[in-house]
Amino acid sequence: AQSVTQLDSHVSVSEGTPVLLRCNYSSSYSPSLFWYVQHPNKGLQLLLKYTSAATLVKGINGFEAEFKKSETSFHLTKPSAHMSDAAEYFCVVSEKGGSYIPTFGRGTSLIVHP
Amino acid sequence: GAGVSQTPSNKVTEKGKYVELRCDPISGHTALYWYRQSLGQGPEFLIYFQGTGAADDSGLPNDRFFAVRPEGSVSTLKIQRTERGDSAVYLCASSLSGLDLETQYFGPGTRLLVL
């Protein structure tokens, strides 16, 4: 069985400051992990995905995430927030080997203040 | 190129009515997924098609929900005897072949409101 927990429902930062969105997962098998972003009235867009080739994954728009097996975490970070980063972010887990049926977290709303 | 499209963008219906939601995936994508996203929640898996067949329908909540993909491209999600609890955003996604780690491309969703 697989599950994902996003530890914060809302994160508020000032423009130009670092962003940290936290995600913990549970998986019986080797997991595949993803972060998606959802801007208002737009479709979900893939930010990055963990392929097991490297624990530090770089994505689009300056985001990156680090897979930590010992902590079962896959936190999303960005060194400097932009106003355009304000959106809903979803951490997603699926289990390798079977059909790709992902489980989404509840989402974290990122608020960026000028 | 064209992304995943969904129609209608909004649908308001009355309790007990029948509704159909349509998804046009990216051309050439064999895998198609339906999700339901309730307010304040992440998308919840409903059903996954590989070509014309439903490879996994374990997420359908009950037998009022049904989906088809007769020609392996466009898919229709059908909800019979709608209930107020069915109100949500219904998302469709497609991917090239449905393999693990493959990127899913999402449509903008259909917002369903059952009065």
Image: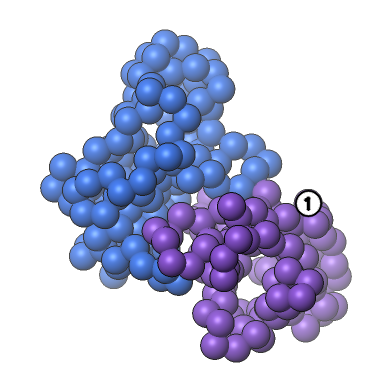
Chain colours: A purple, B blue
Image point (77%, 83%), residue name: A79
Pick the residue in front: B41 or A27.
A27
Residue B93 picture location, percent across and down:
39, 54
Residue A14 relative to residue B107: left or right: right
Residue A14 relative to residue A76: left or right: right
Residue A10 relative to residue B70: left or right: right
Residue A73 picture location, percent across and down:
74, 70
Residue A107 relative to residue B50: left or right: right
For the N terminus of chain B, give its image quadrant. Answer: bottom left
Res A68 → quadrant? bottom right
Numbered circles on residues, count: 1
Residue identifier under label 1 = A9
Residue A58 picture location, percent across and down:
61, 85
Disc 1: CA contacts within 10 A as few (<14), some (14-19) or many (>=20):
some
Residue B104 picture location, percent across and down:
42, 63
Pick the residue in front: A96 or B37.
A96
Task: Tell me the kind of residue under disc 1.
Answer: Ser
Image point (45%, 50%), residue name: B108
Q: Name the outermost residue toward the left.
A: B71
Res A89 → quadrant? bottom right
Image point (55%, 74%), residue name: A49
